[in-house]
Image: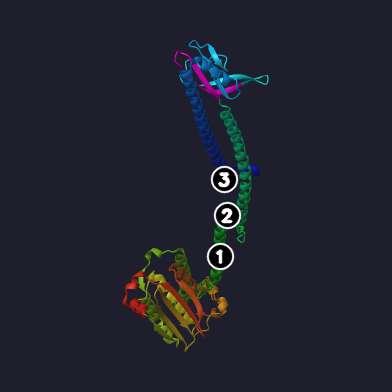
Amino acid sequence: MRRANLIKSSAFRLTLLYMILFGTSVLGLLAFIYLSTIAVIDRQTEDTIDAEVRGLAEQYREQGLARLIEVIRLRSSIEGQDYYLLTDPNLRPLAGNLSAWPKEAEGAKDWVDLTVTRNSKGQEVSHDVRAQLFTLSGGYRLLVGRDTHERTNIRSIVVKALGWSVAAAVGLGLVGGIVISRRMLRRVEHVARTSQGIMAGDLSRRMAVTGSGDEFDRLATSLNAMLDQIERLMTGMRLATDSLAHDLRSPLTRLRGRIELALRQPPQAARDREALADVLRQAELALSTFDSLLKIAMAEAGVGAADLRVIDLAAVARDAAELYEPVAEEAGIRLRIETQGGAMVRAQPELLAQSITNLIDNAVKNTPSGGEITVAVGLSRSSVTLRIGDTGPGIPAVDRQRVLDRFVRLEESRSTPGAGLGLSLVAAVAKMHGAQLHLGDAGPGLVITLIFPIAASAHDSAEWRAVTEA
């Protein structure tokens, strides 16, 4: 089964493909070398034969037939790779080391390839010969040839090299394919086993990273980051479910108890009206929780991102602060507003206003009588900053990141109304708008800072020019 997986793997097939391409390249290269070498050898052979024929013809013209026969006999007596034959007009041999006019030369006019058999050390050996035919004056026929054993040797060398190259390419390709495929298959199987463990419910498992930085490491890193996010979301979902069940149990239980009590008692207008008011308060609390969860989900999913438009953050902050001024005044809290014009950002107005309202509401709830809340909007070259600070008890540094999660309420806040979703909505909206969210110490109290990228259109405003010139 493992061998079948190995052969079917993409790495093995890819290696085979490269092996075929490499083998084809080797074949093409050797074929080019062979043809080029053979062409050079053939050209040199023909040039040598042609020069020999011209020399013999010159001998015949200047010194006659007798001298030509003498020269051919002399040259034929030297054992080598040259072949000569001089015949009369009837093709009867007069001189040379060939016994008769070759059949291959019959009817040929110029160049011809011959197969000549010679006795060498008591054995008949065949030789390939390239020959030129020439007709002398008087009808005499001359054949001059040369052994092409070099050509044959080159062919033999190329064929052997070709065979060994193909064999080496196939062998190395198969070995390399198996080695690479086994290595890749091990990593793929590890990913598959890890995935099966995750599907079985173990969200803590992660893909192995070897540190090589290859594509498998990059894939494993991306998958691990995705799994970390999924684990955080699943953990958050469990916590949200548990917290939701806990925080909704009380209002729903009170709501049910109030209704049952009202049903058991005899009708009484004043008491029934009070019971209905209490039921309405509990229902509004539950609906508020669900509404906050819905807004957080929409912000995290980016719903409404297409509706972003350029708005004045200072105006939104002033409106929200002025809405809470009566509440703060009634609680004996001073609400100070410090805004700067031209603080233009790209935002979804409703969600942004809800976030600022949540922050001011939290500040009012946690600031004691006689305290102070500051809502400030500042402007710089590339950003708009919103700061909301109070003089309440603040949040310990170790808890500042945790309070941004859903349904997280510190022990100090258990006595105040709410479901622990206000800061979660602020964090989701900040992420949706590309803003930075920071929780810090106001000494005493808490200061929450939101830093938004400035809208491009704000660069043309007089306020922005004044800030940059300053």
Along the line of sight, which residue is nearer the eye, 267 or 102? 102
Residue assigned mark 3: 10
Q: How many labels does the image show?
A: 3
Q: Is mark 3 on a helix, strand or loop?
A: helix
Gap in Å between the C-alphas at discs 3 and 1?
34 Å
First-in-chain label (3 vs 1)? 3
Amino acid type assigned to the residue bearing label 2 in the image: Phe
Amino acid type assigned to the residue bearing label 1 in the image: Arg
Along the line of sight, which residue is nearer the eye, 282 or 104? 104
The image quadrant where one finds the N terminus is top right
Near mark 3 (Cα within 10 A), the count class, few <14, some 14-19 or many ≥20, is some
Q: In this view, does 153 lie to the left or right of 337?
A: right
In the displayed image of the protein, which residue is found farthest to the top? 90
Amino acid type assigned to the residue bearing label 3 in the image: Ser
Residue assigned mark 2: 216
- At a point 49% along the width and 28% down the height, the residue shown is 47
Per the rendered image, the range of residues in magenta is 126-146
What x and y, as percent, mark residue 322?
A: 38, 81
Q: Do the residues labelled 3 and 1 touch (CB within 8 Å)?
A: no
Q: Is residue 16 above or below residue 290?
A: above
What x and y, as percent, mark residue 123?
A: 66, 20
Residue assigned mark 1: 232
- At a point 56% along the width and 76% down the height, the residue shown is 399
